[in-house]
Image (cartoon, rainbow, N blue to C red):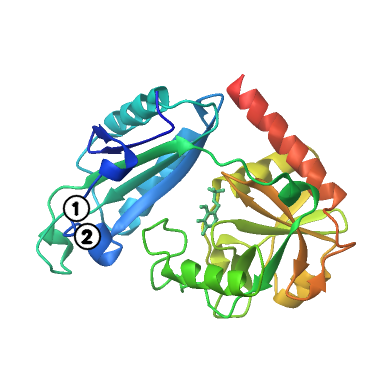
Amino acid sequence: MSKEIISINGTISKPGEALISVMDRGFLYGDSVYEVTLTYNKIPFLLDEHLDRLYRSAKSIHMKFSFSREDLVNEIFKIVEKLTGDRLYIRIIVTRGIGEINLDPAASKTNNLVIIGRQLPVYPKSWYTEGVSLIVSDVLRNSKRSIDPNVKSGNYLNNVLAMAEAKEKGAFDAMMLNHKGNITEGTTSNIWIVEGSKFITPPLEAGLLGGITRKSLLILASKNGLEVSEENITPERLKKADECFLTSSTKEIVPIIKVDETLIGTGKPGAKTQNLHQIYKKFVMEYIS
Ligand SMILES: Cc1ncc(COP(=O)(O)O)c(C=O)c1O
């Protein structure tokens, strides 16, 4: 049993020993797709949804997999079994593979499948009890006519730059705008605001990744009689919101208490955000039981 292992095309290695060629197109061009899923009690959470998104991302960039979905699932479970701990981080990366230095995708015939499995870090409790801050970044989310943000590809350089700006300014994360000036999402999370009793998140058309947590919450909130809506959010609207939070598979729901220099609501995690987090946690418990 290990704390971290990496599988490359089915061969399992320790982290420092898992090596891949520099001629891999994932390294040369970011020509890859990926997913991050996690386990609760060692059960991969919403694995089908993550794999559906992986396949959708691959289709969008005209990448065909040289392995079956069944083999991929088996490989994931093989890794989960070999790891210690209940809360595991599983990163699945599929590159277009190795080929001559040539942008033509046909230069590579076989994918490389890399799965990184490790214990999920324990996030600081204060994120959830005290909340975190955001900035609105100068870096724009790329247009849907470039790499569609709804494709989870290996091209995260925009997000890296936005995160660097957040860190320089002492913030937890950065919100990226689209070309129209509307909020899209965080560097690795979706954004929500609460206005009165309504939960609002930007629509997919704003140019963002259709988060699996976002989708679950849209369904869960409605089922629990909460008002939800997908609407464009400007930075001004965000700063006037009663509550604000981020969502992602690994971090679940993180309350936002400040955007740039503006406090959100009372400057403390909102009650409606915390209530929705409880609903989400119940959903997770039901899923794994
Ligand atoms: C850019 C971006 N948006 C949103 C999310 C949240 O998606 P999910 O809820 O599926 O984890 C992620 C997750 O990594 C992301 O990278």
> For the residue labelled by badge 1, is the local secondary structure a helix, a strand or a loop?
loop
On the picture, is 252 further left or further right than 34? right
Relative to 87, is 240 above or below?
A: below
Question: Between residues 32 and 258, which one lies in front from this camera angle?
Answer: 258
Residue 19, horizontal then vertical, whole percent: 23, 47
Residue at image position (53%, 77%) is 140
Q: Quadrant of residue 117?
A: top left
Q: Quadrant of residue 70?
A: top left
On the picture, is 119 further left or further right than 131? left
Relative to 57, is 263 above or below?
A: below
Crowdedness near tag 1: few (<14), some (14–19) or many (≥20) residues, C-alpha within 10 Å: many
Residue 206, horizontal then vertical, whole percent: 57, 68
Query: Can you see residue 104?
Result: yes
Q: Quadrant of residue 114?
A: top left
Residue lying farthest to the front in this orientation: 16
The C terminus sits in image quarter: top right
Disc number for residue 25: 2
Residue 20, horizontal then vertical, whole percent: 21, 50
Q: Which residue type does callout 1 highlight?
A: Gly
Residue at image position (46%, 59%) is 150
Residue at image position (37%, 31%) is 76
Crowdedness near tag 2: few (<14), some (14–19) or many (≥20) residues, C-alpha within 10 Å: many
Query: Does the residue at mark 2 contact the one at mark 1 (Cβ under 8 Å)?
Result: yes
Q: Pointer 1: what residue?
A: 97
Residue at image position (81%, 42%) is 275
Relative to 281, is 252 above or below?
A: below
Question: Between residues 15 and 95, which one lies in front from this camera angle?
Answer: 15
Residue 107, horizontal then vertical, whole percent: 11, 61
